[in-house]
Amino acid sequence: MTGPQEVDTAEIRARYPDVFDRPASARLAMPMMLVAALGIFVFGLVDLDFSPSRLISGLSQLGWISMMMIPPDPGSSLPIYLKALGETLSIALLGTTLAAVLALPVSLFAARNIVPGVVRFPVRRFLDSIRGVDTLIWALVWINVVGLGPFAGVLAIAVSDFGAFGKLFSEAIEGADQKQVEGIRASGGSALHEIRFGLLPQVLPVIAGQVLYFIESNTRSATIIGIVGAGGIGLQLAEQIRVLEWQKVSFLILMILVAVAAIDFISGKLRFAIIGRRAVA
């Protein structure tokens, strides 16, 4: 039994020398990466003044605040909170829709199967530069430009999502099947006909699903930018936290959670209606 096994092992070693005789650099690469990652993690904890004692004391404070939040109670401010929630939903819906409408034509100039690289490269970098700035920063910028209120929130979400939609839409266009485009070209269609009848019918369901997802995500973003003065329920939430009205804070948080869950349910139904369950599977 031992002889044949030794012969087979020798043959395997001779056949696959790269597997059995790996260089030292290849063997040490993974341990060195793990050690480097651990070193960066420890350095981050030290540099950011991580303190277990502060964390433990903070957890006790968090428990006290959680007890103060029970039961959730809007008091006499329920109509104001409902109006603020509607404002937040409007900010998310309008900002996302405006971004999608503006990004669709621009994404055509960022797709490699439509325009040459000399045109695509600056458009891509332009979209990257816009997408690299967070929605909260855009909100602070637009608040100083147009003033406080929901209009600044709509513009912040629209500009931030414009860069993201431009990238996502262009990638969807690049992944479209070229056979339909070639068929339209062979029948004498122009470049506009190729885009209108060959590409857009394929990518519009994908684009619609992405827009619906962003509406759900931007409901949370609209809450955050409301804290800095862009209107909506975030402004009410920041005010109640400032005055330590924890029961109202918990009620506002529940309102946000219910709204996000409802939008997620509705957008899921709409996505299935647009692209079909078989396509999702």
Image (tube, rainbow, N blue to C red):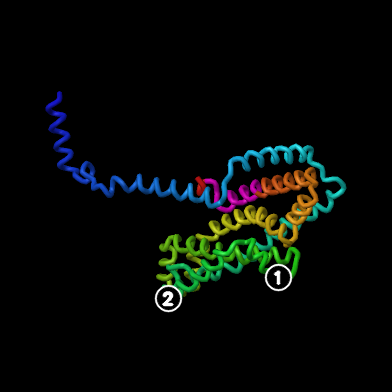
Give the mark, 1 or 2, whose residue is nearer the N terminus: 2
Q: Position of residue 263 (x, y in %)?
A: 67, 49
Which residue bears the numbered disc 1?
144
Q: Which residues are magenta?
A: 264-277
Q: Residue at x 53, y 57 (%)?
A: 206
Res 200 label? none
Q: Secondary structure at mark 1?
A: helix
> From the viewer's perspective, is the residue at label 1 or at label 2 nearer?
1
Would residue 273 be counted in the magenta stretch? yes
Q: Is residue 122 left or right of residue 54?
A: left
Which residue bears the numbered disc 2?
118
Q: Position of residue 225 (x, y in %)?
A: 68, 59
Q: Position of residue 258 (x, y in %)?
A: 71, 45
Q: Residue at x 48, y 73 (%)?
A: 122
Q: Nearer the viewer, residue 276 or 185?
A: 276
Would residue 4 be counted in the magenta stretch? no
Q: Is residue 101 above or below residue 36?
A: below
Whether residue 96 can be seen here: no
Q: Nearer the viewer, residue 245 or 59?
A: 59
| Chief SS of the magenta region | helix
For the N terminus, give its image quadrant: top left
Q: Is residue 189 above or below residue 137?
A: below
Q: Which amino acid lies under the numbered mark 2 shown in the image of this protein?
A: Val
Whether residue 43 can be seen here: yes
Q: Position of residue 169 (x, y in %)?
A: 52, 63
Q: Secondary structure at mark 2?
A: helix
Q: Residue at x 53, y 52 (%)?
A: 47
Can you name the residue that lies furthest to the right here? 76
Q: Which amino acid lies under the numbered mark 1 shown in the image of this protein?
A: Asn
Q: Is residue 134 left or right of residue 171?
A: right
- Marks 1 and 2, Cα distance to the nearest angstrom? 36 Å
